[in-house]
Image (spheres, grey):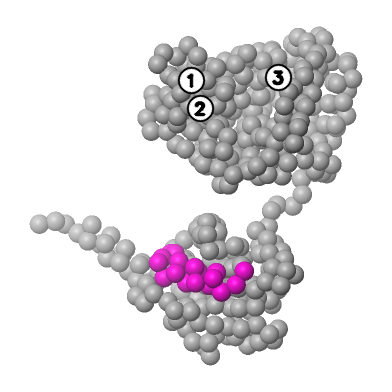
């Protein structure tokens, strides 16, 4: 649901036309014309912006008041054009009962008390703290001080200052140690709209029940991907269907990767296992396997598959966490989860050139070896660090827990 002020001018009509069928549009009357911002780019970078138009928002009607009263989460994108002020009493009420994220503007209203997060960018944080004594510079420490000052001033639960390719710095009232959420990669491109994308992803994640720190991690990654894809200038933003497509399938990436590497004449390497507690033996094996070819895909047993193979109490780590840990390793290019006890079916779809296992197996023992031979692939065994296993780690942890509970003296 979008609450905004629109008039009778061509720009307002364009907004109505473009948003039709995409969001529920609730309008405040606009006395004047809708502001229009024209950006001039050179070499894909903004050089100057030309602004024209403007007006005064009127009073909200019952539909606007009811939407704000029933919202599961609220994002306020304040551009200093007074729309936030026109609905401020209802935003005050919303902040008392639901996650509210406020994207501020130096010329706009201060955020309502109780905002879950306020998301100024670096320049806005500097402008908003120009009256704060002794705060200067562009260091992380300086921005942490600004964030703490603003959190106290606005009575916000947290202030997340966006710092471009440095990531986001989260501070809370009273100072304390700030949290830096770095960008997952350096995104080169036009950053126009990245702040809006960041704030929108943040409030959606909070509505899904994520903690602020988790929401910000998701938002930083999403904003980086947005910039890398072309930012606000990406035509897919405007031509994509109004109804969201199917959820992202990480497994599809593994199959696409394998096809792409084969098409370029490269070598696809795969390995598999439970990877319940990733340890030094796993890391060494994965690093060695990656050096064998041009990509490494890990075939990972699902939770039910691990339980059937290892018994009750396993896995110790749920599959979503195991996928995340493996995908974070620099040696791993993709992860695909399979439900069966052995990975023959998924291997038939991936068709790797090389299947790798650790030295605690022999090639003759591997049921996957025959499958690999059917398309000319090869199963190999790599050296493995002896004495490292999930079972041994679990036993040591259990012994340590017992000794900690035992009475002393």
**Which of pointers 3 and 1 lies earlier in the amino acid sequence?**
3
Look at mark 1 in the image and give the residue it sits on. Answer: 150
Residue drawn 69% across the image and 13% down it: 82
- Name the side, left or right, on which 359 lies relative to 332: left
The Cα atoms of the two marked residues, 3 and 1, are separated by 28 Å
Q: Nearer the viewer, residue 350 or 129?
A: 129
Tell me the crowding category of disc 3: few under 14, some 14 to 19, or many 20 or more residues within 10 angstroms, Cα based: some
Residue drawn 36% across the image and 67% down it: 394
Q: Nearer the viewer, residue 47 or 302?
A: 47
Most distant residue in the front direction: 43
Residue drawn 73% across the image and 23% down it: 48
- The spot of residue 28 in percent (x, y) is 77, 16
**Which of pointers 2 and 3 lies earlier in the amino acid sequence?**
3
Tell me the crowding category of disc 2: few under 14, some 14 to 19, or many 20 or more residues within 10 angstroms, Cα based: many
Residue extent of the magenta highlight: 277-294
Look at mark 3 in the image and give the residue it sits on. Answer: 65
Q: Are marks 1 and 2 in contact (CB under 8 Å)?
A: yes
Look at mark 2 in the image and give the residue it sits on. Answer: 159
What secondary structure is found at the residue carrying circle 1?
Answer: helix
Residue drawn 71% across the image and 44% down it: 229
Q: Nearer the viewer, residue 304 or 231?
A: 231
What secondary structure is found at the residue carrying circle 3?
Answer: helix
The Cα atoms of the two marked residues, 1 and 2, are separated by 7 Å
Most distant residue in the bottom direction: 364
- The spot of residue 280 in percent (x, y) is 40, 67
**Which mark lies nearer to you, 3 or 1?**
1
For the N terminus, which image quadrant? Answer: top right
What secondary structure is found at the residue carrying circle 2?
Answer: strand
């Amino acid at each position: 649901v979008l609450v905004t002020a629109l008039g009778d001018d061509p720009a307002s009509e364009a907004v109505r036309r473009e948003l039709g069928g995409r969001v529920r549009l609730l309008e405040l009357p606009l006395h004047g014309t809708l502001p229009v911002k024209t950006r001039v780019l050179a070499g894909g970078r903004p050089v100057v912006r030309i602004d024209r138009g403007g007006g005064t928002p009127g009073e909200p009607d019952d539909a606007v008041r009811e939407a704000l009263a029933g919202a599961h989460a609220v994002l306020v994108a304040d551009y200093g054009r007074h729309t936030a002020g026109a609905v401020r009493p209802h935003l005050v009420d919303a902040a008392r009962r639901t996650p509210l994220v406020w994207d501020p503007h130096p010329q706009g209203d201060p955020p309502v008390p109780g905002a879950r997060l306020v998301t100024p960018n670096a320049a806005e944080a500097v402008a908003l703290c120009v009256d704060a004594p002794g705060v200067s510079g562009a260091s992380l420490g300086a921005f942490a001080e600004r964030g703490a000052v603003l959190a106290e001033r606005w009575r916000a639960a947290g202030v997340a200052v966006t710092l471009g390719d440095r990531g986001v710095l989260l501070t809370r009232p009273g100072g304390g140690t700030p949290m830096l959420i770095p960008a997952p990669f350096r995104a080169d491109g036009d950053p126009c709209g990245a702040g809006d994308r960041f704030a929108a992803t943040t409030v959606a994640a909070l509505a899904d029940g994520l903690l602020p720190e988790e929401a910000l991690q998701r938002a930083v990654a999403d904003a980086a991907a947005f910039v890398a894809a072309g930012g606000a200038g990406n035509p897919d933003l405007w031509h994509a269907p109004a109804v969201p497509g199917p959820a992202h399938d990480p497994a599809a990436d593994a199959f696409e990767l394998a096809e792409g590497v084969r098409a370029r004449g490269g070598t696809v390497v795969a390995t598999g296992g439970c990877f319940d507690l990733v340890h030094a033996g796993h890391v060494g094996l994965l690093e060695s396997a990656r050096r064998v070819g041009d990509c490494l895909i890990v075939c990972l047993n699902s939770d039910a598959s691990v339980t059937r193979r290892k018994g009750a109490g396993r896995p110790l780590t749920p599959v979503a966490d195991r996928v995340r840990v493996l995908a974070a390793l620099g040696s791993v290019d993709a992860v695909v989860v399979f439900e069966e006890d052995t990975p023959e079916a998924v291997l038939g779809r991936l068709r790797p050139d090389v299947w790798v296992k650790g030295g605690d197996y022999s090639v003759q023992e591997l049921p996957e070896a025959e499958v690999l031979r059917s398309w000319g692939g090869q199963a190999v065994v790599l050296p493995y660090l002896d004495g490292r296993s999930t079972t041994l780690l679990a036993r040591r942890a259990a012994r340590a827990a017992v000794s900690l509970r035992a009475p002393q003296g």
